[in-house]
Every structure is written in structure tokens, then in C-alpha cells.
Image (tube, coloured by chain):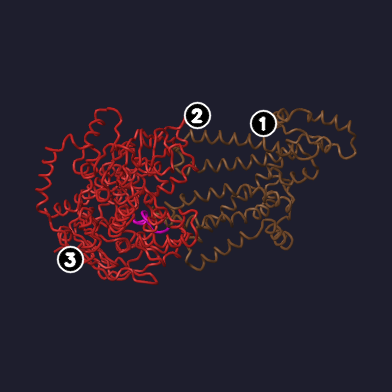
Chain colours: A brown, B red
Amino acid sequence: MVLVVLRRIGLFAATVVVASIVTFLMLSILPGNAARIALGVQATEADVAAQTKAMGLDRPAVVRYLDWFGHVLVGDFGTSTVSRRAIGPEITDALGITVILVLTSVVLALLFAVPFGILSAVRQRKPDGAILSGISQIGVAVPGFLAGMLLVTVFAVTLRWLPAGGWVDPGDDLGGFLQHLILPAIALGSVQGAVLSRYVRSSVLEVTREDFIRTARAKGLGVGRALFRHGLRNAAVPVMTVLGLQIASLLVGAVVIERVFSLPGLGSLLLDKVALRDLPAVQGIVLVLVVFVLLLNFLVDLAFTVIDPRLRSAS
Amino acid sequence: MTPPTLSVRDLRVGSPFAELLHGISFDVAAGERVGLIGESGSGKSLTATSVMGLLPETLTATGTVRLNGVDANLLTAPERSLNQLRGNTLAMVFQEPMTALNPLMRVGAQVAEIMTVHHTEPGRRQAWERAVTLLAQVKLSNPRAAAQAFPHQLSGGQRQRVMLAMAMANNPQLLLCDEPTTALDVTVQAEVLKLLANLVADRSTALLLITHDIAVVAEVCQRVLVMYQGNIVEDGPVARVLTAPQHAHTQKLIAASDLSAVDARGRLHTRSRPVIVTPITPAVDSAQRTIEADATAAPILPHRAAHQHLERGGPPVIFNAVAGAPAIRVRALSRQYRRRGGGGLFAPAPVVHGLRDVSFDVAEGQRLGIVGESGSGKSTLMRILCALDRPSSGTVDVLGQPIGTASERQLRDFRSQVQIVFQDPMGSLDPRMKVRDIVAEPLHNVNRAEVRARVEAQLSAVGLDADVMGRHPHQFSGGQRQRISIARALISRPRILVADEAVSALDVSVRAQVLNLLADLVDEYQLTLVFVSHDLGVIRHLCDTVAVISDGRIVEGGPTADVLDHPLHPYTRQLVGAMPSMHQLARRVSN
């Protein structure tokens, strides 16, 4: 067990290193000179040469990479070529917002998907099961940004119950924080929840056909008890797989939703920096996003090991 | 007179489209052991699931099912009262020990659960302790460790013991077993059946044992019910039914099960024929034969010589060595695997030996049977012979060509010379291809008209009409699909045919037909046959030579009759002992 966890940690670290190399390479093979971009169109050749030297761009790629990644490891993402300020704190602030948004929407998605999926599986042959199944089908078809705009129109513009956008720090005002969080989290979580509920449904249906559920029934457990005691944990395994795969698309969704609700998260920051052509900042943000996805996947993998004893013995 | 433990009257089970059970009636007396036999689709499992009240939602049952001491008709009783009976008064063991246990729950907890559900033990701790005791009673060595284990850490036989422990936990009045040993190796099967018989006898539990295997019934039961197309066609004491079956279907079933009875051409009986006569003479006869054989045969038989070499730890033995150019020549063949992710973080993965130092020949036209249990290495050997896997060391020459190191291009001709029939007639045919295309696939550089003619000829050679060509595999029964597989294997006119458990998934009557077909075709095309099987009866019938594999080694080999009648290696003895012939069965049950 410990060995398996250690191996997973090792694998995670290795993936992070590879991801950092890919991120670095992708941004350094972009056409255009970072120094010229930083100075703008009116810069002279001499200025560009001086800037190139100042940014250390005249050094070999390997040295530049090691320099950059070495600093990133201690939390130093370099300085912005636009604002001339350290990028690190900016990223940390924005990351906090995105993490809160993504995790809240995952929790909301699960809170919706698990009971909804189980119910529509159990009531499969009944009319209400078909209706439930239809609702989730609609949910799958609605894109997150549309859900967001609909929510804003109904709850912010028409009913005026909740703010249409913006962000309040939980330390400043917890009530305001929750008010600002709820709509974007629902918008982001609803699509994921709908998709996930389809998988919960099919996974539960699959499990109810398993031999060991029949065994449980033969032991004298009722349908519900057999499903609850033996089925759900088994059904959780494929659902977790899907959840792991969804995390990347959740972050993409977060980039859009942050725009819709004008939240100063990592997605908004990334779009701003791209528009400003602030390459060191873009590089840092992309790496943070990638590591975030990897980290969540790593946690999902660990959860697998906890749920399924077959994965604990290393074979 | 005490009322029967189980009484079934006019049980009918139907789907919205058809009736599947046509009003069957039978009783099982207290402590009686009753077998329920029949081929797949005859309604055996439906009968048991109806009694348990676990029919799929789409099926409905009518009639009456009564248990002694329970007022209600189980078919109409409310779910709540059925839950109180299931696992308590009546219990069930299923066929697949691999999937019947929850993979995420410790075995001990699963056994203990049946006691906590019915409150037959006061608390969790006591239930767990009882579970450990029960696991000891089903002869699991180290029951405490077994209770802590997860199902994947146990073998198939061990899991079926766990299922038995679970079923017997609350001392049920009636135990239903649905093919409890079909998925197990023969030697394991024998042990589990013995255990089952002892458990029900100790507790005087009534037993309804479903199986397709007459030998299993003869081993355990006193009375047998024979099912055919949703009806019970025969009901009587095992000895009588086995030796003097009344119904034509029972006669056919028994005739087809008897792999030692052949007609003048050496083919199995696939139709009903005069009942097997209770052999009184063979009892004396076989004893005599043994004595004669021991007196005369000792050093002459080749397999004895080979075995003696092996025992003395002498040089590696070449089994069935053939002078000149054999069809298959295998020398010092070994195959190791690295278990994936098996080692430590940095330690190399442990090596698993699939085959160790195997050497044998197969002469042109010979029929070699390879026998062994699951995990013995017989499938690895088959895969290497077909160049689907490569040896780790050693040489394999097939039809004079070394295939261990050959490239895929060099193997092109080899592939048309050596063809395979696989075990699973459901999984080994592409469900989206038509029969015509499946059978024609091995043909290359042949024009359309000739392909059609050859496919037609080949299908008729395996006993299928030409009009099946446009159909898809799911429209055929298991036996028909195996015929299609055989047609596909033979269309390229191979010289060697390799069959991997080719009849294991078939019902006995179909098995007899397919075995006859194979025997005919092997004669007609003068094939060299390598037949891999766990079933000694099938090997004895079809093969002239046999190699017994255990733990990656050939432990014994030689002429089939010689090896099976006078096994030398303890493992072969164990195998032979676990597989009684029909005559032995008839003799045993009539005593």
C-alpha cells in the first residue's frame, strides 16, 4: 500500500517535470522574440539586444529552462514584462479564486449527480426514471456559458436575488463571498453534474446486474440494502475515472465562466496576459493550470487505491 | 410422514413473448440430495431462481413453491418475508466463484453479513468469529487469514468454499447450488463436491444441485431430475436413471456423455441408443487388466522410460521423440513473464514461469492431447506453437521451419499451414462479420467465384448449409459457431490443426457431434492435431498421444491409453482419479 502510494507520488513528480518542459518549449518556439514583444513595435535593434540580454534570452535554452523551473519550484515565477512586477503573487491570488470555484462546482456536481443518477437507475423502468434521465440529457446539451447567462438573467437581472458578477474575499465578508460564488459554481457544476449523473446511472445499472448483487439478494438483503451495501462502492470506481477525466474540461469551463461572471481567477488572468503578450506570465499560468489538473488526477488515483483493494497489491 | 422440505407444483415461468418453464412439479424431502440436470436453455437455472424469488424483472412465475414450515406460496409472498427466508431457511451457491463475491469487501465480512442480516449472531464481533469457524469448516487452511483476504486474493476453489461457508452459515433447510463446480479444475471440483456432500449430510440440509455434468450428480446426489425444454422429463434414483434411463432425451444425454462408448467407426453416439448396461464384468475385468499390465508392461512403454528419467533428475526428457522429420519439434522450450508492476519501487518485477524446459515431438498425422489445469502453461504452449507468442529460450520447429525467431513475413506461409480453433465460440468470431467473410478470411489471392465455391464446400464439410453464408455469428448456437470456427480453420488446407479447449463450452450432445466432426475431418484431411484440454475423457477419445502438463513442465507423456490407464506421476493419478468414467459411475451408484 505504502509502496503503491510512493510510486504514484514519484509518477506525479515526473509528470510535473515533463509538463514544465513541454510548457517551456511550447512558449519558446512561438514566433517572435520575447524581448521585442516586451518593448513594443517602436524599439530599436539596440534596445532589443539590450533587452534580450537583460531577460537572459541570449543563454542556451537548457540553461533558461533550468533557471526558470528552478525558480518556479521555490515559488518565483519571474517578473512581468508589462507591469515589471513579480508574477508569483498575482498567480497565487487568482489561483485561490479558481480553486474555490472549481472545487465548489465539483462538490455541487457530485451532490447533484450521485442521488440523481442512482435514482434514475433504480427507477429505470418507471416513468419518473425516464423523466429524470431526460432532464440530465438536457443538462448535458447546455453549454456552461449559456447556463451562466441564463442564471444571471433570472437570478441577478430579473429577481435581483444575487449579484451578477464580481468577487468578494471570504476573509472580508463571508456572506458576500457565498453570494458571489453560488451562481458561477452552479453554472460550472451543472454541466459536469449532468454528464456525471449519466455515468452514475449507467454505472449503478451495471452493478445491479453483477453476480455479487445477486449473491447479496440470496443472502436476504432487500434490493435497496444490497445496492447500498455492495453496489455503491463498486459503482464509484468507474464514476471516479470519469471525474478524473472531467477535471481538465472543468478548468476550461472555469476560464469561460470567470469571464461571464468577471471573476479575477486564473482563467481571466490568463486571457488578460495573453492579450498583453506578457509571455513570462502566460508561461507561469499555463504551468500552474497543468499542475493543478495533474494534482487533481493524482488525488483521484489515490482515491482509487483506497476504494479498490485490487489496486493496493501492486500487481 | 413428514412433509417435503421443498414442494414445487405446476411452476410456469414466462417472458412476455414465450413460456420458458411449462408447469414443472417436484418435491425435495428433508435431507434429500437431488440433482437437476439438462442442457443449457433447458430451464434448470430458471427453476432455482424461481424458488429463490430472484427471477429477472422481465419474467413472471405462476404455480406454487412451498417450503416446509412456511405458510405462504413463495411465488406470491411479499418481498419482505422472502428476504427473511433467503440466506436463512434457503440458501444458494452460484456458478461463477470469480464474480459472485463483492470484490471490495473482505471475505470474512461477507460471510459474517449473512448472520448479522438475519440476527443469528448477537453482534458483529460474534458473527466475524463464526465466519472464521465456518471458513475452517469448509477446509480453508488458515481461516483467520482467509477472512481478512479480499476475493481476488483467493483461488476459484477457495472462493467457492467461501460461498459454501456463507450459504451454510444459518443452517438452511434447503440449499440450491447452480453449477457450483463448473468453473473449477477437475481436481478442485472433486474436493469441493466432497465438501458439499459432507456439509449437507452433517446438517441434514436438503440439496437441489443443478449441473450439466452427470458425473457430478452421480458423485453427490441420491435422486435426479432431468430437464428438457422447460419440462421435467425424468425423475428417479440416480442409479436407475444412469443405468436404465427411460426418456429418449435422458438416453441421449447419457450416451453423449459417455466418451468411452463408440460405434464401429470409433465415433461417439449422438442419438439415443440402448441404455448402458450396468457393467458387472468390468469390475473384475479392470482389476485383472491392471495386474496383467503391471506384470508385462513395465519397462517397454515409452512413457515409463521417460518418466523414470524425469524422476531420477536425469537429463531433460524428450517426450514422444520421433525419428526423422516430425511435424512439430520442440526442444528445451521455456517461457517466462515478468509480472507487471510486481516488484518494489526499484526492484525488478518477479519472473513468472509459464513453461520450463519443455521438449517433445509430434509426428505427422499424430493426434496429441495436452492436458493440464488452469495456470499449468498449456495455453502458453499452444500460443507458442501457433507463433502467437515467442519462447524465452529453446527452439520450436513446425513443419521444418523454426518459428521461435521468424519474422511475421517469414511466418506468412506458416500461418496458412497451422490453424487454430479457440475455446469460446461466442467471443472468437467477429460479431460484425458475415459467416461468408469469416470463413473466407484465411484465403489470399483467390478470385471471388472460387472463394464462394470453397466457402460453400467447407461449410458443407462441417455440416452447415450454404444459406448460412449471409448471416452473422449471433444467429447461431454455440455448436454451430464452433463448426464455423472449424470451417474457417480448415479452408486454407492446413497441415496442423491446433484446438484450444474447443469443446469445453458446449453441451454434451453438441460436444459429441463436434468431436465426431473433428475426428472425421482430421482423418479426411490427414491433419496433425494438437488438442489442448482439461478434460481427460475428451483427450482419451480423440487423441492417440497425450502430454500431461503441470506447473509449466510436461510431467508425463506417451500413448493415451497407456498414460491414462497406468498413470505414473502423482499429478496424473490425481487427474485420472478425479474423472470417473461412465462405467465407474454406473457401478458406483448401483453399489
Looking at the image, the residue that sits furthest to the front is B324
Around disc 3, counting alpha carbons within 10 Å, would you say few (fewer than 14), some (14 to 19), or many (20 or more)? some
Distance from Cα at disc 2 to Cα at disc 1: 26 Å
Indicate which label's residue lies in the foreground, 2 or 1.
2
Q: Mark 3 points at which residue?
A: B246
Residue at (23, 59) in percent of width and height: B269
Of the numbered discs in the image, which one, if any, rests on residue A73? 1
Range shown magenta:
A214-224
* Residue type indicated by callout 1: Leu
Judge whether A91 appears above or below B447 on screen. Answer: above
Whether residue B69 is visible? no
Around disc 2, counting alpha carbons within 10 Å, would you say few (fewer than 14), some (14 to 19), or many (20 or more)? few
Coordinates of residue B94 in the picture (x, y in percent): 32, 54
Asked if residue B193 lies left or right of residue B430, the reply is left
Q: Which chain is home to disc 3?
A: B
Q: Name the residue under label 2.
A: B346
Around disc 1, counting alpha carbons within 10 Å, would you say few (fewer than 14), some (14 to 19), or many (20 or more)? few
Distance from Cα at disc 1 to Cα at disc 3: 84 Å
Q: Nearer the viewer, residue A152 or B58?
A: B58
* Residue B324 on the magenta segment: no
In which quarter of the view is residue A208 placed? bottom left
Of the numbered discs in the image, which one, if any, rests on residue B322? none
Residue at (44, 47) in percent of width and height: B415
Q: Main secondary structure of the magenta part?
A: helix
